């Protein structure tokens, strides 16, 4: 961390930072632990052109999750632009390895989040980000319409523009819509974390689950569950606890694939060709 940024943070928070430690795990931003005599803070720094908008959206998502009181999220203290980029300061949650009991608690609390703050539309107040990519959130009254137009089509277009997908790989909008209409149930819009893989939750030292790095919007609650299963899945205690609160609907496995398609398209656009076969396989199977 640059000395000038450290001094700027000290001035804004009226603190004396005694130690700065780099933290691993950030694919998009640099992460730091800021240590004072009595407190620790978590700092993210990003030098991209969209950094301030991205961090503002992250703060908005964390605050929306916290407001439900269903599950915890870190408190954000600062979200400020830099000459190039921006930085975000929040409370530091010291993590511990999750136990079976902790994962069950996370499952119950995620279900509570999905039950909280019901909405009469699918989408969000503003567009935001999935990773560093823009995520469109225009309101729709129909879930399948939202998913096709605000999730699949923007990522498919980006992949085609970047030559990651060819014309022969891509189904028509009509086919995308018809399949989703057939497989998606009527459901109450739920507040979603939006990017719930294993790196986006923490268990604190006292066993309290926290959600981090959200990409929130109102959607079908199964989307968060589908994402948890994409890269190996969570502990079975998490799923057992979660499904105590919801009835499983027909075609859940098919929807899991289609919901994972969005995240695979995001990974294709962020990280390249290694995700092509996974994307192509789902497109070919369902569309």
Image: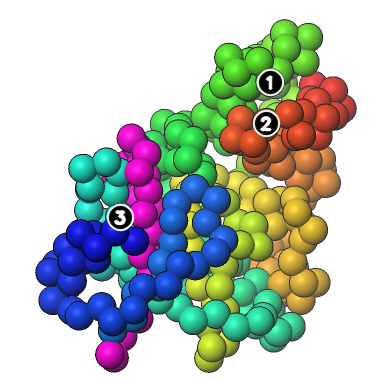
Q: Earlier in the sequence, mark 3 or mark 1?
A: 3
Query: Tag 1, which secondary structure?
Result: loop
What span is colored magenta in the figure? Answer: 37-65
Question: Which labelled disc corresponds to residue 272?
Answer: 2
Between the residue at mark 1 and the residue at mark 2, the CA separation in whole angstroms equals 7 Å
Q: Residue at x 55, y 80 (%)?
A: 95
Tell me if 61 is positioned left or right of 101 in this view.
left
> Tags 1 and 2 in contact by the CB under 8 Å rule?
yes
Place residue 180 in its image quadrant.
top right
Tell me if 78 is positioned left or right of 42 in this view.
left
Question: Which labelled disc corresponds to residue 175?
Answer: none
Inspect this view and state whether residue 100 appears. Answer: yes
According to the image, label 1 marks what residue? 164
Where residue 207 sits in the image (x, y, percent)? 57, 87
Where residue 23 sits in the image (x, y, percent)? 49, 67
The image shows residue 272, relative to residue 217, as above or below, that is above
Q: Residue at x 26, y 56 (%)?
A: 79
Question: Which labelled disc corresponds to residue 87?
Answer: 3
Q: Earlier in the sequence, mark 3 or mark 2?
A: 3
> Tags 3 and 2 in contact by the CB under 8 Å rule?
no
The image shows residue 202, relative to residue 8, as above or below, that is below
């Amino acid at each position: 961390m640059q000395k000038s940024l450290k001094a700027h943070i000290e001035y804004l928070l009226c603190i004396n930072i005694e130690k700065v430690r780099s933290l691993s795990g950030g694919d998009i931003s640099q992460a730091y632990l800021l240590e004072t005599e009595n407190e620790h803070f978590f700092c993210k720094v990003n030098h991209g052109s969209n950094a301030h908008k991205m961090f503002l959206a992250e703060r908005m998502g964390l605050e929306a999750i916290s407001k439900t009181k269903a599950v915890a999220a870190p408190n954000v203290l600062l979200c400020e632009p830099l000459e190039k980029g921006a930085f975000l300061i929040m409370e530091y949650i010291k993590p511990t390895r999750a136990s079976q009991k902790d994962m069950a608690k996370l499952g119950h609390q995620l279900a509570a989040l999905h039950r909280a703050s019901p909405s009469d539309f699918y989408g969000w107040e503003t567009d935001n980000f999935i990773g560093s990519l823009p995520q469109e959130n225009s309101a729709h009254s129909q879930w399948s319409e939202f998913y096709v137009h605000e999730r699949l089509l923007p990522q498919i277009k980006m992949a085609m523009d970047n030559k990651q997908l060819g014309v022969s790989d891509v189904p028509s909008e009509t086919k995308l819509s018809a399949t989703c209409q057939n497989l998606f149930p009527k459901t109450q819009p739920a507040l979603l974390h939006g990017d719930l893989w294993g790196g986006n939750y923490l268990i604190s030292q006292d066993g309290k689950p926290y959600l981090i790095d959200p990409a929130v919007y109102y959607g079908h609650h199964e989307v968060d569950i589908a994402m948890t299963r994409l890269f190996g899945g969570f502990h079975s205690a998490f799923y057992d606890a979660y499904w105590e609160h919801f009835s499983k609907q027909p075609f859940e496995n098919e929807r899991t694939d289609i919901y994972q398609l969005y995240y695979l398209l995001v990974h294709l656009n962020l990280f390249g060709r290694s995700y092509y076969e996974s994307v192509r396989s789902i497109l070919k199977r369902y569309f």
